[in-house]
């Protein structure tokens, strides 16, 4: 996540692009986003997105 | 009975005395208002106090009881609602000045159910802004303070519920829990905090943070009170499409005290992450007590426990950003920076990343269900630490520096991701006199087993009878 990409996305999403704020946001993203990449390493072939179980029976399937 | 003693009666105890007319809702509410006035300068539990309406409601409740129109065990019992539960005609700020003028024109489902049950609303309770944080700090309305040590956090986001219930300002409080926001302040403030199964309680009429992980739950001083509240609020709601069409049992009947044969699993992964040694010791003793009470305790393995944070955070951040996108764009500069940054960060998660996290969530839920096929409950710490000083952003634990958000949610977040019911009960105190919580979690819609075990443990100890030195 370069500062340029951060600024482009912020503009596209209508976020505040005050330079000081963008600097802070970029630092925050650098600290948080890498930790989320772990999801890509998990094996979930053939699995579909789903919500939590909606009943006892669904929960016990 | 003096004011303090009255204010520390449980809802169960108050209900009996109200029904028998030994106590009037009016004197109960007056006592609580007196306690609120005396403690508020030190605790800052409330955003909006409703003294006059509460007294009027109490007089009405008194008339109803006297004319044999008793509504049930919650009739006349004082209640505080986290200030994101919609209350008709009463401002609902969600903990931020940006929303200070929001006055809903309807009661949310939880609000109206508890009103129908006859509770007396004392006020709207303080919270971490927009419920997006686990410490209970709030620059707009002031930080909440832990009654056990007022220099320490209450925890959050339902921090005002924590301080109000623990100090006797309210008998009952209702919080919400997206990553731990009922259980974290409940554990830090020495309370019982219940996060029911996702869909067990309607989310209609409250400020959303993340649709698929938000839960409503009571923060109270006894397990019995938790069961009484759950009786009053659980059930299908046509206004909430995610509410579940599952029958609501009488949860108070689950409080038998008998847990012989209940199979309790302790994930070994719980002790592979940073944890304070005093907390670990207290929790392990509590688990041993469950065994003494007849539960069959065993070690289990939950490999995906370690991956919960990135899965849950990807989903939560995306949902929160989407939910509050207009607020961020129009009022971002007025939001408290830590909350603002967390909200804005959600815009930087790609749709494909979000969907991969949802697939990972399927995997996580399946593994959770598999785990609870051979055992009935998971047991472990609610938190790895006790309450720390207000303003702390990082803590050194086990030689490692850890951010407080990750630390405070490491044991609670898995049950927001899978939606399973989870409760925290007090299980001891640190050398500094700060509460420690034991978390028990069960199968979807099996709150009965969760409550039964929590009650059995609670009744075999006196942790829940201790009061903060305030």
Image (spheres, rainbow, N blue to C red):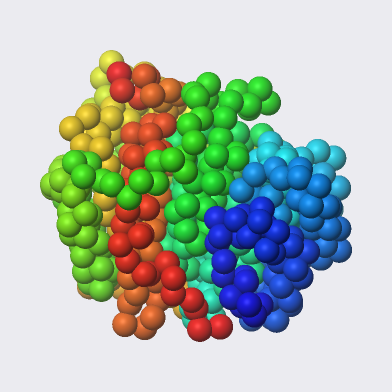
Residue B288 visible in image: yes
Residue for point 26% across, 46% down: B259
Which is more toward the observer, A5 or B112? B112
Residue for point 64% across, 49% down: B74
Left or right: where B84 falls relative to A49: right
Quadrant of the snapshot with the C terminus of chain B: bottom right
Which is more toward the observer, B325 or B29? B29
Left or right: where B309 falls relative to B85: left
Left or right: where B210 falls relative to B383: right
Q: Position of residue B104 (x, y in %)?
A: 81, 43
The image shows residue B191, relative to residue A12, as above or below, that is below
Residue for point 27% across, 54% down: B380
Q: Residue furthest top?
A: A46
Q: Position of residue B377 (x, y in %)?
A: 27, 42
Q: Position of residue B11 (x, y in %)?
A: 58, 57
The image shows residue B188, relative to residue B292, as above or below, that is below
Which is more toward the observer, B20 or B391? B20
Where is residue B458, by image quadrant? Answer: bottom left
Q: Position of residue B366 (x, y in %)?
A: 28, 27
Residue B321 visible in image: no
Quadrant of the snapshot with the N terminus of chain B: bottom right
Left or right: where B46 falls relative to B359: right
Residue for point 50% across, 50% down: B226
């Amino acid at each position: 996540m370069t500062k340029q990409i951060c600024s482009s996305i912020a503009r596209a999403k209508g976020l505040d692009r005050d330079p000081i704020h963008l600097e802070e946001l970029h630092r925050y993203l650098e600290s948080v986003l890498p930790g989320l990449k772990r999801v890509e390493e998990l094996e979930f072939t053939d699995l579909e997105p789903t919500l939590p179980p909606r009943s006892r029976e669904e929960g016990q399937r | 009975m003096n004011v303090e003693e009255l204010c520390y009666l449980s809802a169960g105890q108050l209900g009996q005395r109200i029904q028998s007319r030994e106590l009037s809702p009016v004197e109960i509410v007056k006592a609580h208002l007196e306690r609120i006035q005396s403690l508020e300068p030190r605790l800052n539990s409330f955003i909006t106090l409703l003294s006059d309406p509460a007294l009027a409601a109490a007089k009405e409740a008194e008339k109803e009881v006297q004319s044999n129109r008793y509504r049930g065990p919650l009739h006349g019992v004082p209640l505080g609602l986290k200030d994101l539960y919609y209350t008709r005609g009463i401002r609902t700020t969600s903990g931020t000045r940006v929303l200070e003028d929001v006055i809903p024109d309807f009661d949310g489902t939880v609000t109206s159910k508890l009103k129908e049950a006859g509770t007396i609303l004392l006020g709207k309770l303080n919270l971490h802004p927009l419920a997006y944080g686990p410490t209970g700090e709030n620059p707009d309305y002031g930080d909440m303070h832990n009654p056990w040590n007022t220099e320490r956090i209450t925890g959050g986001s339902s921090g005002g519920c924590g301080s109000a219930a623990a100090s006797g300002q309210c008998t009952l409080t209702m919080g919400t829990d997206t990553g731990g926001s009922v259980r974290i302040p409940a554990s830090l403030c020495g309370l019982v905090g219940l996060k029911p199964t996702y869909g067990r309680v309607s989310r209609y009429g409250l400020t959303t943070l993340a649709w698929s992980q938000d839960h409503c739950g009571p923060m109270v001083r006894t397990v019995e009170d938790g069961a009484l509240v759950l009786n009053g609020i659980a059930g299908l709601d046509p206004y909430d499409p995610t509410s579940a069409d599952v029958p609501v049992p009488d949860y108070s009947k689950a409080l038998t005290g008998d847990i012989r044969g209940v199979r309790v699993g302790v994930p070994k992964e719980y002790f592979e992450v940073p944890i304070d040694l005093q907390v670990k010791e207290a929790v392990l003793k509590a688990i041993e007590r469950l065994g003494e009470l007849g539960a069959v305790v065993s070690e289990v393995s939950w490999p995906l426990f370690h991956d919960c944070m990135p899965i849950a955070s990807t989903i939560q951040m995306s949902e929160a950003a989407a939910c509050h996108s207009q607020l961020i764009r129009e009022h971002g500069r007025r939001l408290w920076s830590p909350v603002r940054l967390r909200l804005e960060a959600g815009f930087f998660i790609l749709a494909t990343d979000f969907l991969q996290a949802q697939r990972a969530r399927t995997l996580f839920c399946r593994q959770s269900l598999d785990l609870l096929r051979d055992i009935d409950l998971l047991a472990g710490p609610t938190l790895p630490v006790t309450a720390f000083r207000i303003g702390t952003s990082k803590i050194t634990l086990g030689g490692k520096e850890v951010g407080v958000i990750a630390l405070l949610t490491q044991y609670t977040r898995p049950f927001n991701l899978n939606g399973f019911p989870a409760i925290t009960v007090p299980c001891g105190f640190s050398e500094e006199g700060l509460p420690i919580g034991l978390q028990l979690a069960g199968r979807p819609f099996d709150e009965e087993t969760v409550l039964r075990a929590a009650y059995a443990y609670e009744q075999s100890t006196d942790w829940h009878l201790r009061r903060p030195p305030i």
